[in-house]
Amino acid sequence: MNALNIFHETANNLYACAEKWKKATGKKVVGYFCTYAPEELIYAAGALPYRIFGSKGNITLSDSHLQSYCCSFARACLEEALSGKIGFLDGTVFPHTCDTIQRLSDIWRLNAGFSFHIDVVLPVKLNTESAKAYNTDVFKKFKKDLEAALETEITDEKLRQSIRLYNSIRKALAEIYTMRSELPEIITGKDMHAIIQASMVMDRNHLFENLTTVLETLKGNKGSTKKSRKKRLVLAGGICSQPDIHTIIEDSGGAVVWDDLCTGTRYFSGKIDDTPDPVKAIADRYFERAVCPAKHVSNTYRGENIVRIAKERNAGGVIFLFYKFCDPHGFDYPYMKSYLDKEKIPSLLVEVENQLPADGTIRTRLETFVEMI
Ligand code: SF4
Ligand code: SF4
């Protein structure tokens, strides 16, 4: 199987991938929410960090716990737990982010039935020295909690190895993104989506080997890849679990050349420094990386950032993609749009549920937007 197929196979069979790893290694699998979970510590503890993406099917069991006006991401994740689909997890990690995730954490602790549950209570403001020091302490506490839960010791040496591996993975993902930005036809959005999604669940050593293979293949294909005539677009929002969105955009004559997503640049941007205190180094990365709307840097940061991305990537438009009832993204959207408007960069808002509607409305809106820019 070639490396790209391995990514698709993994992304299409997330549960089977983790279950197979667990059976083969006899080790533990730790579910986590959000890019604010310090995966490097989980991996250094000998466990597999598994990003929880939420069930794709109908949501029924969660309805006993969450109102229908909660985002369908939270509802779909709880559904996955209550239905036993992610019963292979040994425990879960909840970083302190949006209100929905904070409340979901309490419901999860009482109902999901995993053997351990760790809240990582991060600061909300990521712009002061005191927040930096506090964040390091939070991660040090998380390290202790994880060691106790997994009955292991995370030595500095193991942590450094994990950091080196994660730095290499992030660098490889950034290189693939950069190549795609220069030559959008070199890899499809659906392939890119599979790579990112698989990156969050598969064995990270195996992941790095496959990323290296994909990167080498793409470098080899550069000369023969034709220049794209597609309209250059940026995708912005939270989690994108909708590979079909990419196909619709490409069928409409567009190409995503960069993003500001949790399942995208926010996952891999930033390098962890090799400093004497590896936990501090992991914590400090979050102060350099672009924040999502659940964290605060300044009243203008995210607006300026989306304009900067669009200009740097020579994009003709921005598509905001987030879940219905997602308060953090919903609050930031008007002001981010106004920043784009001021620069005359067109944008489109697409709100989704955990499944795309079958009626073709999203296709029509995307086609119209791409045609317009
Ligand atoms: S938008 Fe922020 S809080 Fe929500 S999953 Fe992404 S990183 Fe986490
Ligand atoms: S950031 Fe938005 S989509 Fe993600 S859990 Fe919070 S409310 Fe839901």
Image: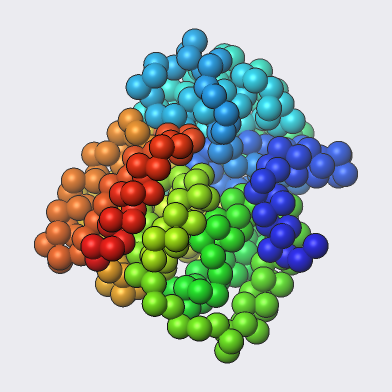
Q: Nearer the viewer, residue 359 or 355?
A: 359
* Quarter of the rendering occupied by the C terminus: bottom left
> Does residue 316 sit above or below 162 in this rendering?
below
Residue 131 visible within the image: no
Side (left or right) of 318 relative to 229: left
The residue positioned 56% from the left and 15% from the top of the image is 61
The residue positioned 75% from the left and 44% from the top of the image is 17
The image quadrant where one finds ligand 2 is top left
Side (left or right) of 306 relative to 251: left
x, y percentage for residue 370? 31, 61
* Quarter of the rendering occupied by the N terminus: bottom right
x, y percentage for residue 155? 72, 51
x, y percentage for residue 194? 60, 55
Q: Nearer the viewer, residue 102 or 44?
A: 102
Q: Identify the colour scheme used.
A: rainbow
Using the rendered view, name the quadrant where residue 327 is placed: top left
Name, please, the residue furthest toward the left.
Answer: 342
Q: Nearer the viewer, residue 53 or 354?
A: 354
x, y percentage for residue 362? 37, 45
> Does residue 44 sit above or below 30 in this rendering?
below
Using the rendered view, name the quadrant where residue 289 is placed: bottom left
Total residue callouts: 0
Residue 313 visible within the image: yes
Name, please, the residue furthest toward the top.
Answer: 64
Q: Nearer the viewer, residue 54 or 284?
A: 54
The residue positioned 58% from the left and 87% from the top of the image is 224
The residue positioned 33% from the left and 49% from the top of the image is 364
